[in-house]
Image (cartoon, rainbow, N blue to C red):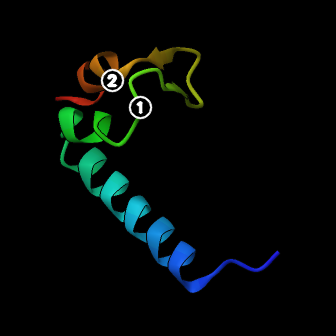
Amino acid sequence: MPVSTDDYASISDFLARYCWLVDESDGDGWAALWSEDGVFAGVSPSRSSGARHFARSRSS
């Protein structure tokens, strides 16, 4: 299914913000990208749940 130009731009913008915030160790900004009940399960064995935990796990 083709992606609309607007969807493509929105996804690209989100990914750019996501990467920038991770690179800058901005845990609060990174956490703000997610809903309060979000779950992040990356390649490491640990999971992060909730915006506050996201912020702590991504801050330097």
**Residue located at (31% from left, 58% from top):** 17
The residue under label 2 is: 51
Q: Residue furthest right?
A: 1
**Rendered image quadrant of residue 52:** top left
State if disc 1 and disc 2 touch (CB < 8 Å): yes
- In the image, residue 57 above or below residue 27: above
**Residue located at (38% from left, 23% from top):** 36
Q: Nearer the viewer, residue 20 or 4?
A: 4
The residue under label 1 is: 35
Q: Label 2: state its secondary structure.
A: helix
> Tag 2: residue type?
Ala
Q: Nearer the viewer, residue 53 or 34?
A: 34
User: Is 50 positioned to the left or the right of 2 in the image?
Assistant: left
**Residue located at (46% from left, 20% from top):** 37
- In the image, residue 23 above or below residue 55: below
Query: Residue 55 location, x and y as percent?
Result: 25, 26
